[in-house]
Amino acid sequence: MPHRFTWIGVALSGLLGVAAGAFGAHGLQGDVAPGLLETFDTAVRYQVWHTLAMLGVLVWRQIQPLRGQRLVLALWASGAALFSGSLYLLVLTGARWLGPVTPLGGLLLMAGWLALAVCAGRARPAR
């Protein structure tokens, strides 16, 4: 399978997203302030949605490999790691210094969507 390690990484991101969601719904109840539960839920949602988006780009890449698809995947993977990861750690450890990391992750996620638009704009229909 081409891009095996990318597929494995995306699969593990999905696994982590489901595990984090279950932990947030069951393991954190009563242990953290309600606002922090919402923050944790936001981290889960962003991670899972971007994991699904990465799956879509991986499938597209197998059908129609284009320059820029790897950049999209890299931006989303690093953005999700920084955005969701910083929020997970903020909720679990209370480390407020992670606050500035979250917007950086969000910028990387947005850059990934912009890169996807550019990549899609370069795609030419099959003849």
Image (cartoon, helix red, strand yellow):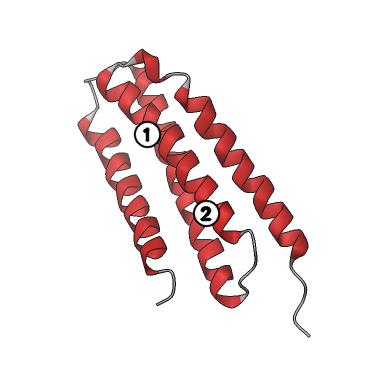
Q: Tell which of 15 and 23 is nearer to you.
A: 15
Which quadrant of the figure has residue 108? top right
Residue at (38%, 15%) from the top-left corner?
97
Tell me which amino acid carries mark 1: Gly
Q: Quadrant of the N terminus?
A: bottom left
Q: Is residue 115 left or right of residue 92?
A: right
Image coordinates of residue 83 in percent, x first then y, are 46, 33
Tell me which amino acid carries mark 2: Leu
Residue at (54%, 74%) from the top-left corner?
62
Image coordinates of residue 77 in percent, x first then y, are 46, 47
Q: Is residue 69 visible?
A: yes
In terms of secondary structure, where does tag 2 sit? helix
User: Badge 2 is on which residue?
Assistant: 73
Mark 2 residue crowding within 10 angstroms, few (<14) / some (14–19) / many (20+): many
User: Badge 1 is on which residue?
Assistant: 85
Does 99 appear above or below 74?
Answer: above
Q: Is residue 71 left or right of residue 96?
A: right
Image coordinates of residue 60 in percent, x first then y, are 58, 69
Q: Is residue 93 left or right of residue 98?
A: left
